[in-house]
Image (tube, rainbow, N blue to C red):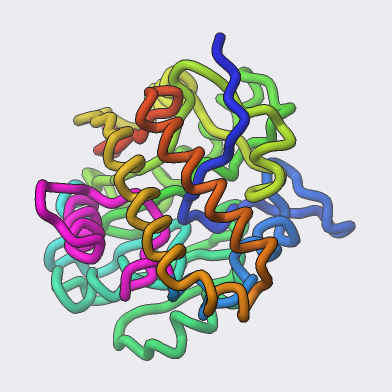
């Protein structure tokens, strides 16, 4: 098995519960998530696209970063069959790019997002898009009053287990997540998932901990086992080259704005992110990591 000393960027907010002492029950704690995402909206604005979408884009030749991100958001909306839906849930909503697009482009009446980042939640609220709602809570805490017509989760699963979590324990965690999603989803409803995943290797724990502490990637076989009997897997795509291209686009924008970024967060953090994005792009190019896009349908007898 190949071991790679690098990390990778994801959009998710962790979304895992804590006990009263603040210890994470499953994966990344609130403190770990906020240490990353609450570093400052202005910093991320310098190198993400204008919609502040912090996850792998869906690229066609000649795309700008913004267009590739819009295509990705539309892809997941279409996979989840959201057009004209009354209620849609976004688990790991980031800075609200999907929530906004669901309302403004796909005619969704109400779009609810979950995040563990106070900064991201405040940002979404300031957007003031009618029909959008954001909650600072984990998926283990979420208790909707009524079912959703569709669910989307882009980049959240990467935070559901820690590096020391065994494969069997991971399957149990992922199955708990999908059981909750099935309960929240109306009969016949669809769900669209995007997650990075291990292909050929694993992170050395210290490498990923420097960017996303207390987090680790799933494997496709673990997700398939967790889904059994709960969701029909309608389709699976693996697009690692799209993530390599996304990382390089982010890296180029960060380097173009390095002086401004350093003024916001300091030279050391900027250099760290530059090295991180470069290594991530190489890892996805080499097929060490995959980028899975799954379309799921609630299984009903």
Q: Is residue 73 visible?
A: yes
| Residue 214 position by quadrant | top right
Q: Is residue 59 left or right of residue 43?
A: left
Asked if residue 74 is among those painted magenta in the image, a careful observer would answer yes
The spot of residue 23 in percent (x, y) is: 83, 51
Residues in magenta, as a range: 47-76
In this view, 203 is above or below 191? above
Q: Is residue 213 left or right of residue 108?
A: right
Residue placed most toward the observer, 77 or 69: 69
The spot of residue 144 in percent (x, y) is: 47, 64
Q: Residue at x 59, y 53 (%)?
A: 14
Q: Residue at x 33, y 55 (%)?
A: 249
| Residue 162 position by quadrant | top right
Q: Is residue 19 left or right of residue 272?
A: right
Residue placed most toward the observer, 84 or 261: 261
Q: Residue at x 33, y 50 (%)?
A: 246
In this view, 76 is above or below 228? below
Asked if residue 218 is among those painted magenta in the image, a careful observer would answer no
State the quadrant of the N terminus: top right
The spot of residue 124 in percent (x, y) is: 44, 80
Q: Residue at x 42, y 60 (%)?
A: 54
Direction right: furthest residue: 21
Q: Is residue 296 visible?
A: no
In this view, 198 is above or below 65? above
State the quadrant of the C terminus: top left
Residue placed most toward the observer, 185 or 78: 78
The spot of residue 39 in percent (x, y) is: 64, 71
């Amino acid at each position: 098995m190949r071991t790679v000393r690098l990390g990778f960027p994801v959009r998710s907010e962790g979304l895992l519960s804590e006990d009263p002492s603040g210890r994470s029950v499953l994966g990344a704690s609130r403190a770990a998530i906020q240490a990353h995402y609450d570093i400052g909206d202005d910093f991320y604005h310098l190198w993400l696209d204008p919609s502040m979408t912090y996850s792998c884009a869906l690229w066609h030749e000649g795309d700008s970063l913004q267009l590739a991100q819009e295509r990705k958001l539309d892809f997941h909306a279409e996979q989840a069959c959201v057009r004209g839906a009354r209620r849609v849930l976004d688990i790991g909503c980031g800075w609200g790019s999907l929530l906004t697009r669901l309302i403004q482009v796909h005619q969704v009446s109400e779009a609810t997002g979950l995040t563990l980042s106070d900064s991201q939640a405040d940002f979404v609220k300031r957007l003031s898009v009618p029909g959008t709602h954001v909650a600072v809570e984990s998926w283990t805490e979420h208790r909707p009053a009524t079912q959703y017509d569709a669910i989307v989760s882009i980049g959240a699963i990467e935070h559901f287990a820690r590096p020391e979590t065994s494969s069997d324990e991971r399957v149990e965690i992922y199955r708990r997540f999908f059981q909750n999603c099935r309960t929240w989803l109306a009969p016949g409803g669809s769900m669209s998932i995007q997650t990075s995943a291990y292909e050929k290797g694993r992170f050395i724990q210290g490498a990923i901990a420097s960017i996303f502490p207390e987090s680790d990637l799933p494997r496709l076989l673990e997700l398939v086992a967790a889904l059994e009997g709960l969701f029909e897997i309608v389709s699976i795509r693996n697009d690692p080259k799209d993530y390599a291209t996304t990382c390089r686009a982010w890296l180029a924008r960060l380097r173009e704005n390095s002086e401004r970024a350093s003024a916001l967060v300091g030279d050391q953090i900027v250099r760290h992110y530059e090295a991180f994005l470069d290594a991530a792009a190489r890892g996805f190019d080499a097929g060490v990591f995959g980028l899975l896009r799954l379309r799921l349908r609630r299984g009903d007898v």
